[in-house]
Image (spheres, coloured by chain):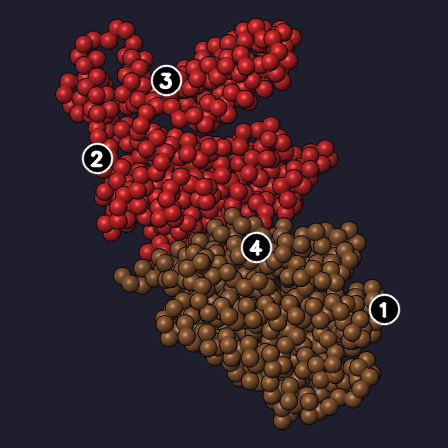
Amino acid sequence: MKCVVGIDLGSTTTKAVLLDEGGEVIGRGITNSRSNYEVACAVAREEALRAARFTVLERALVAEAQHGVPEAERWNRTLRDQFRLELYLDELGELREEIVRVLRSLSYHRDREVLTAAAHEVIDGIVAEAPALFSEVGARRSDFFRDLAAAGFMAGAEKIASRDGIGFERLVGLFDRAILDVETRLTARPFGALLTRAGARLLGTESDELRRTALTRAIGRAAAEPIEEISFVGTGYGRQTLPFPKSAVKSEILCHGRGAHRVFPGTRTVLDIGGQDTKAIQVDDAGVVTSFQMNDRCAAGCGRYLGYIADELNLGLHELGPLALEAHRVVKVNSTCTVFAGAELRERLALGERREDILAGLHRSIMLRAMSLIARSGGVDNEFTFTGGVCRNPMATKVLGELVEENYGAGITINAHSDSIFMGALGAAMFGLDDVRAGRPAVMPSFVQAAMAQ
Amino acid sequence: MTTIPILDPVKPAASTGSSKDDSQVRQKEMIGDHFERLSTAKEDGRKVVYTFVPGNLTELLRSLDLLPVLPEINALQAGMRKQSGAFIAEAEKLGHSEDVCTYVKCDIGMMKSGGIGPTGKRLPEPDLLLLSYTGCFTFMKWFELLREQYNCPVVMLHVPYQGEGKVTPEMRKYVVDQLERDVIPALEKLAGKKLDMKDLARRLDLSRQAEDDLVKVWESAKHRPSPIDGYFGGVYYIGPIFSAFRGTEEAVEYYKLLRAEVEERMARNEGPMTPDGPSTKERYRLVIEGPPNWTSFTDFWRMFSREGATVVASTYTRVGGLYDDGFRHDPENPLESLADYCLGCYTNHSLPARTAMIEKYVRDYEADGFLINSVKSCNSFSAGQLLILREIEKRTGVPGGFVESDLVDPRYFGKANIENRVQSYLQMLEARKDRGAT
C-alpha cells in the first residue's frame, strides 16, 4: 500500500500519522521526544508503520476466521499486547547491555562487581514483571519505554539498595546514563520477527497445526505487505531542527487547525495545549486558518506546567485530572509562573488545603490563561475543538467547558477526542497528501533513509 | 517610542555592486559626520539640545545653531551593536524595573557607562532638554531622569492628543503660543541670539522638498514588485529626515538620490535590497504596525525576506511625520506648521484614526497581510493594537498576525518563537491564497 506520513515533533511527544492515498488514517504512532529528533521521528514513524501492518494483520485474521479458525478474529488484541511485550523485552535487553558498558567504562573499580550484579538483578526483576504489564488492562502508567523502564528500575533499585547497602543514587545514575544512549540510538526491529515471537506467546506450545498455520499465514501477510511512503510532511515545536527539507515543513498552527477540522468538520475554533505552547486557532469552513494566537515568552499553563505539578506531588501526569475532579472547592492558584505555582502548591498543602482542591485551582488557572489567548485570537464560535496532550486530562476539559460557557454562552459544542493529541500529525499528513495530488515529488527525510539502510 | 536607525548600510551581495546603494553610503557618511560634530561640540563652543524624534523641532534648533542629540537613536544604535543588554543591566542596577521602556534604560545605562555614543565617540552632555512631544508620557519621565543627572533646564511643549481624530484651530494655537512664549525664548537664551524667521522659513522649505521625495519613495511600494521594503529597508530611509538633518541641503540631496535609485529599481522591475542581496521574488506584500526589534534586526528581517515577504507600508516609518498623509512643513506658516508636525505624530492619533490609516495602507498598497510587532514596554504603540488588528481584518478581509518582541532588550527576542509565528503567519497567508484560488 502507498501512504503519506505526517510527523508532529512536539516538545514532549512525537507523533506520526499515516494516510492512504484516499486520505484514510491507516496507522499512527507516538513516542516521547528526546534529545535526538531524528530518532524521535524515526520511532514515531516506525510505530505508525507497525500500526498499519496491524491493520493488515487484522484483516488477515478475519480471513482466517472465515476459513476454519473462528477464534483467529480474537487474536488481534492479544497479539498487539504480546508484540509490545516483545518490543519492551528487546529494549530492556539493550538497556542492560548499555548499563554493563557504562559500568565497564567507569574509571574506578572498587564496587563495579557489586554494582553490576545489582543492576542485573534490577533488570531481571523488570523482565519478570513485564508480562503482567502487557496483559492487564490499565497496568501501564505510560506507553513509553523510558517511563516504564524508569519506574521499574527505581522500584527495583530502591529494594536492592536498602537490602545490600548500595547507594540508590549510584544505581539510578547508571540508568540515567544508559537510557540516554539507548533512547537516541536507531535500532532496526523487524516487524515479522517480533510478531512471530508474539504469536509464539499467544499459542504457547500445545496448539494444533491448523491454528499454527493460520497464524503463521496471517503474520506472513502482515509482515510482507509492501508499504511505500510517497510523501512526508513534518511539523511541531522542533520544526527548526526537524529532519525534513524546508519544503516539507508546515507550520503547526496550520496542521493543528486542519487536523482538528478533519476530525470535527464543524470546528471553527481550536485550542491546542501541548507541552510548552498553547495555541488558539480560528479556522474557516475548509479548515484553513484565519487567525491564531500563541503563548509568548513564557510557557506557564502548558503541559509541562502540569508535568511539574505532578512531579511535585509525586503523581503520574494522567492521575492529576481524575484527582482534581474529586475537589470540593477550587483553591485560587496563580498561573503566571510554573515555579511559583509549585511553591504555592506546597504552601497550600502545608496550610492544610486538600490536594484535590488545590489541583482544581491549578487546572482552572491554566485554562484561564488559555481563555485569554482564545479571546485574543477572536473568541469562540460554535464548534470548538480542544486538542494536544492536555486535552487528555478530564479536569482540563471540564474546566474549559465551564469557562467557554461563562464567556461565550451555553450551547457551544466542545469536542475533545481521545486522539486529539494526533491532530497536528494528521494535519501534516493531509498537507503531504496535497503534495502528492499536486504532483510535487515525494520527500525522503534522512531518518527514513537511515532506517531503511538498516 | 520612536526612532530611526542610522546604521551601516545593508551590504549588497557581491555580485550586485552597482550604484544602487549610493544613498546608503551617503546616509552613513551624514550620520557619521553628525556624531563627529557632536563629539567635539563642547570644544567647538556649540550648545547641545537633547530632544526626541516624534515632534522634533530640528529646523528651529538648526536656525539657532544648536546641535540636536536624540537619545532614542543612541539606544537603538546600541541595540543594533549588541551593547544594549549591558546598558540595560546597568540601569536595572540603579533600580529601574524590568518593565520600563528599554530605550530609557539603555540610554541611562549608556550614560552611566561613560556616555560613549554608538559610533564610539563621546556624546556631549546636554545644555537643555527639549521635550516637544508629550504623547509619550515616558518621554517626560525620561527627561526627568536626565535633568537630575545633568542638572540642566527642560523646556516642555505640551501637545494635546488628537482624541477626535483632527487638529482643531484651538489646538494649533495652543501649541504655537507655547512655541512663542516658552520654547523659542528658552532656545534663544541658550543660543545667545535671536531667531531669524527668514532662516527658519528657508529651512522649512528645504524640509518640504525632502518630504516630497520621501513620499515618492514610500509610494513606489504600490508598484509590483515593490522596489523598497517599507519597514526593514524603510527604517534606513527615515534616518536623515527624522533626525538631525531635516531642513538641511544635505537631506534634500540625500532624498533626491534615494528617490532616483528607487525609481530606477522600479523601472527595472526589481525588488528591494535584503540582508541577502536583492529580493528576487515578491510572494507576500505586508503592512506592519509597531516598531521593529533592534537587537536582532537582521534576523528578524530575514524571517520575512527569505520567505519573499516584502513590507509595502509600515506605521513605524511614519513616527517622524505623516508626510504621505499630506502633511508638509510650510515656509509660509512656520510656527503653525511646526505645531501641526508635533500634533501629527503617529502615536498622537486616536485608535480610530490609526485604524483608518492602516486600512488605507492595506488597500492602497494591495497588501496580502497585516502584521503587528507588539512591544509590551511601549504603551504608546501597543495599547489597543489587538483592537486595531481585529478591525482591520473585519474591514479589509486581510488576515492579521501578531508577534511580540522588544526594542532593545535582547532578553525579549525569542528567535525560535518569533520565527515560528512569522512562518505560521506566512503559511496561513499562502493557504488562504490557495483557498481563494479554488
Position of A248 compared to B105: left or right?
A: left
Residue type indicated by callout 3: Glu
Q: Nearer the viewer, residue B342 or A359?
A: B342
Would residue B373 be found to the left or right of residue A216 on screen? right
| Amino acid at dot 2 | Met
Q: Looking at the picture, which amino acid does disc 1 mark?
A: Asn
Under circle 3, the secondary element is helix
Q: Please name the residue that numbered disc 2 is placed on.
A: A1
- For label 3, the residue is A86
Identify the residue at the far right of this view.
B151
Q: Which numbered mark, 2 or 4, is in the foreground of this view?
A: 4
Q: Residues within 10 Å of mark 3 (few under 14, many from 20)?
A: many
Chain at numbered mark 1: B
Q: Residues within 10 Å of mark 2 (few under 14, many from 20)?
A: few
Q: Mark 3 falls within which chain?
A: A
The reply to whether the C-beta atoms of the residues labelled 2 and 4 are less than 8 Å apart is no
| Spot occupied by residue B308 in the image (x, y as percentages of width and height) | 40, 60
Q: Considering the numbered disc 2 on the image, is that residue within a helix, a strand or a loop?
A: loop
Give the image location of residue A76, x and y in percent: 28, 23
Write down the quadrant of residue B68 in the picture: bottom right
Task: Kindly identify the residue that appears in the image at 40 percent across and 51 percent down.
Answer: A254
Label number found at residue B296: 4
Q: Earlier in the sequence, mark 4 or mark 1?
A: 1
